[in-house]
Image (spheres, rainbow, N blue to C red):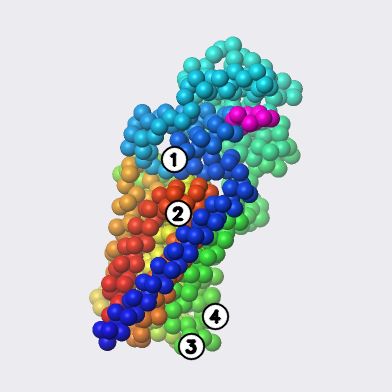
Amino acid sequence: MLGQGVSRARGVSALTIAVLALSLLAGILADHLAGRLHGPLQRARALAQDGLYAEAEQEYAELARRRPASLPAVVELLDNHELLLLARAQPGGPAGDDPMRAPGGAVPRQALVVDEGAIDELLAATDLPPDIALLGRWWREVTRRASDSADRAAVLAVADAESPVPWANHLLGREAERDERDAEAAERFAREAAAFDDRREDAERACRRWIEDGDWDRLGAALARPAFARQVGAGVRLQEAVRRRDWVGAARWFFPSQYEGATLGIIALALVSGLAWFAICAQIGMVGERPRFRVPLYLGAFGLGIASTYVALAAAILEHRILGLAEKGEAAVDVIYFVVGVGLREELSKTLLLLPLVPIVRRWGRRREALACGALVGLGFAAEENLGYFHMGLSTALSRFLTANFLHVSTTGLVAVAIDDYVRGREERPGDLSRTLMLVVAVHGLYDFFLSSASVDRGSFLAMLVFVLLTRRFVDVLRGLPGREGPLLRLFCVGLAVVAGASFVYASALVGPGHAAVALLEGALGVVIVAYVFVHELRNV
């Protein structure tokens, strides 16, 4: 038996290493292909979004020197340079409180790539078109907190002209935003969006400001203008419809709002991850033993999990509108919000959609089906939620992407077993179901708090500690089930390797293999914790 266990462990390790090695090669290939398909602008933006300002500056500097000149490239170079200066001024800490700071948490010391003289020379180039030279020179002054009144007057003139110069109102809006002149910023962004067709970001920024200020009349008036309205996304439309209690309109925009910003790469990554975890959960439920019963049951559970995300979203909208629940940036307040708001809302939403399966499992199933159904409801929720992570910055998105699947699988699986024990009258102690619900709500809330809250500086690694508790509790349930766990152990390790490898390939296509590996570190820690505890507890079963 011991020899078989050692042989099985070696086989799992070899297969897992093979998957990771293939992922490394695929990541290098993806980087090569992406360089041809996407170009340096997408690469520079991805690097800057992940806080790699020095590396991004190399790309931006090359773009800003190209002809014909591109004002967005010049402006993004100046933005990135400002962030790089902030990062150097505060080594090892966040790059200040500036609203232009990209997400990503702590910023390491970075060296300047383009010195101040080179930037001045670039903006003074004689072959730079006058409008680009004016706007670039003025934005350089804004980022240095030394705006010249003459240049600003010239920028106002071209922005307020009957046919405004492209990007003039956008930059004036950003200047107003920096100075907390929010109403003025919104109007400038709206004017830019109404004047040019490719300004969805400006339209969204104007709408977001009106929504935050509660200026629904101004939002409604803007949406009445076709040139502006066609650039407004489904998320804003949904909030505006809910405000007007237009439930038909809300239903129309509800589903499209969930997929805004989901690129083909994100969808492909979510699909790979979903399939890998579905295979793991199906093996937990030993789908092959009773396929006629278990296949439709498990598919239904996954579908109910997807549906539960919309229940949670509706609850979130009502919470915000009625109770005003939101993150405040204060640790003591935010931990309550994430536990009582996010954790409670999402766990109850999944539990609510799990309930239709309870009588089916009680009549025709056993504890194993209960665990698998709960895990698959959690997976359905996670698979849908995964599509919305990638606006947070690459490191944060991948950290959540690699760990949130198991979080939802384990929490809902534990709740499902607790419900099954309760309805069958086999609770070890009265109140076990209530205690399990409180545990998963608290753990879920703390995970989100440590990983997402702006009030916790460099505390995201603490979110990984919840996996020690969750994995042990989940494996404890598995150990109590009859049946061989060898195939599950192999599938679990290989499945985690597939998900991590696919994430590495996706990140490599954006920022290259080296930076992709760094972006994956935090999420990989959670994966390693889960895998270690899982293997340690099940290897001899």
Lower position in the chain sequence, tag 2 or tag 4: 4
Q: Amino acid at mark 3?
A: Arg
Identify whether 11 is placed above or below 504: below
Q: Give the labeled residue for mark 2.
A: 398
Q: Amino acid at mark 1?
A: Gly
Q: Marks 2 and 4: which is nearer the front?
A: 2
> In whole angstroms, how far apart are the C-alphas of marks 1 and 4?
45 Å
Mark linked to residue 84: none
Pointer 1 residue:
51
Few, some or many residues within 10 Å of mark 2 (<14, 14–19, 20+): many
Instruction: Name the element at disc 3.
Output: loop
Q: Which mark is residue 296?
A: 4
Mark 3 vs 1: CB contact within 8 A: no
SS at mark 1 in the image: loop
Picture residue at 33% right of the left edge, 34% below the top:
91
Asked if residue 70 lies in the magenta stretch, the reply is yes
Q: How much space separates mark 3 and mark 2, taking CA atoms?
A: 36 Å
Circles 2 and 4: CB atoms closer than 8 Å: no
Q: Position of residue 459 (x, y in %)?
A: 32, 47
Q: Which residues are magenta?
A: 64-72
Within 10 Å of the Cα at label 4, are there few (<14), some (14-19), or many (20+) other Cα atoms?
A: few
- Quadrant housing the N terminus: bottom left
Q: Which residue is mark 3?
A: 290
Query: Residue flagged by tag 4: what amino acid is it?
Result: Pro
Which mark is in front, 3 or 2?
A: 2
Cα gap from disc 3 to disc 1, whole angstroms: 50 Å
Q: Secondary structure at mark 2?
A: helix
**Camera-nearest residue between 479 and 89:** 89
